[in-house]
């Protein structure tokens, strides 16, 4: 699985938002999530499963009748995920329910997805360092919808990060066991 490379704009290099870091890999730079929490402050990054050599973001999830764990790549814009179960095939409109793996708190919120062709009203909320900084992800499988709330960072930079790609539950690329 190769990492997709994305041009990191100059203004972003000067203002890396809280919870992210820039890392050089070979000739390319990547934006990596390094701190992300449930609302009770539990760190969702785990060392036990690494993707692309970095700690992954662990979530407990329910999809339809199935319950298990998913590990999401911390590289911003990567869609790589490892599942603790083999997800059955679901309709595109299937919604993922996500929970903190430490306290079991629901990570769900009401969310109006702005993606064309998606009318989902359910989202997954994740907290970046600083009480006002959040990532909202559309809970519908395969929808790239997401929204970033980051204060104290210029809006252009937030827009740039948002455009780099999405951080979401999305498609099934890799199956764990
Ligand atoms: Zn928690
Ligand atoms: Zn959506």
Image (tube, rainbow, N blue to C red):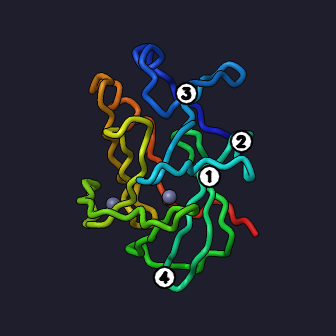
Q: Does residue 142 appear to the left or right of 35 in the view shown?
A: left
Q: Does residue 126 appear to the left or right of 172 in the view shown?
A: left
Relative image position of residue 100 (x, y in whole percent): 51, 62
For image coordinates 29% across by 22% down, the residue present is: 154
Q: Earlier in the sequence, mark 2 or mark 4?
A: 2
Q: Earlier in the sequence, mark 4 or mark 1?
A: 4
For image coordinates 36% across by 51% down, the residue present is: 136
The residue pinned by badge 4 equals 64
For image coordinates 48% across by 82% down, the residue present is: 64
Q: Are marks 4 and 3 in contact (CB under 8 Å)?
A: no
Q: Does residue 173 appear to the left or right of 8 in the view shown?
A: right
Q: Look at discs 3 and 1 and give the one toward the viewer.
A: 3
Check the image and report above or below for 58 versus 89: above
Ligand 2 quadrant in view = bottom left
- The residue carrying pointer 2 sits among few (fewer than 14), some (14 to 19) or many (20 or more) residues within 10 Å by Cα, namely some
Q: Nearer the viewer, residue 164 or 52?
A: 52
Rendered image quadrant of residue 165: top left
Relative image position of residue 150 (x, y in whole percent): 33, 34
Q: Earlier in the sequence, mark 3 or mark 1?
A: 3
Q: How far apart in space, not on screen, are marks 2 and 4 (Cα)? A: 29 Å
Q: Earlier in the sequence, mark 4 or mark 3?
A: 3
- The residue carrying pointer 1 sits among few (fewer than 14), some (14 to 19) or many (20 or more) residues within 10 Å by Cα, namely many
Q: Earlier in the sequence, mark 3 or mark 2?
A: 3
Q: Nearer the viewer, residue 140 or 2?
A: 140
For residue 80, which numbered disc appears in the image? Answer: 1
- The residue carrying pointer 3 sits among few (fewer than 14), some (14 to 19) or many (20 or more) residues within 10 Å by Cα, namely some
Q: How far apart in space, not on screen, are marks 3 and 1 (Cα)? A: 19 Å
- The residue carrying pointer 4 sits among few (fewer than 14), some (14 to 19) or many (20 or more) residues within 10 Å by Cα, namely few
The residue pinned by badge 2 equals 52
Q: Are marks 3 and 2 in contact (CB under 8 Å)?
A: no
């Amino acid at each position: 699985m190769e990492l997709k490379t994305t041009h990191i704009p100059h203004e972003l290099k000067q203002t890396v938002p809280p919870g992210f870091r820039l890392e050089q890999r070979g000739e390319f730079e990547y934006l990596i999530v390094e701190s992300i929490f449930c609302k009770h402050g539990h760190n969702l990054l785990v060392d036990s499963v690494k993707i692309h050599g970095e700690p992954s973001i662990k979530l407990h999830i329910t999809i339809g009748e199935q319950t298990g764990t998913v590990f999401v790549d911390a590289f911003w814009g990567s869609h790589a995920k490892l599942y603790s179960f083999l997800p059955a095939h679901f309709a595109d409109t299937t919604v993922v329910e996500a929970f903190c793996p430490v306290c079991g708190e629901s990570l769900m919120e009401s969310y109006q997805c702005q993606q064309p062709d998606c009318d989902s009203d359910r989202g997954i909320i994740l907290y970046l360092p600083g009480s006002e900084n959040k990532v909202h992800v559309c809970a519908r499988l395969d929808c790239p919808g997401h929204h970033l709330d980051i204060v104290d960072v210029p809006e252009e930079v937030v827009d740039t990060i948002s455009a780099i790609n999405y951080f979401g539950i999305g498609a099934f690329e890799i199956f764990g066991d």
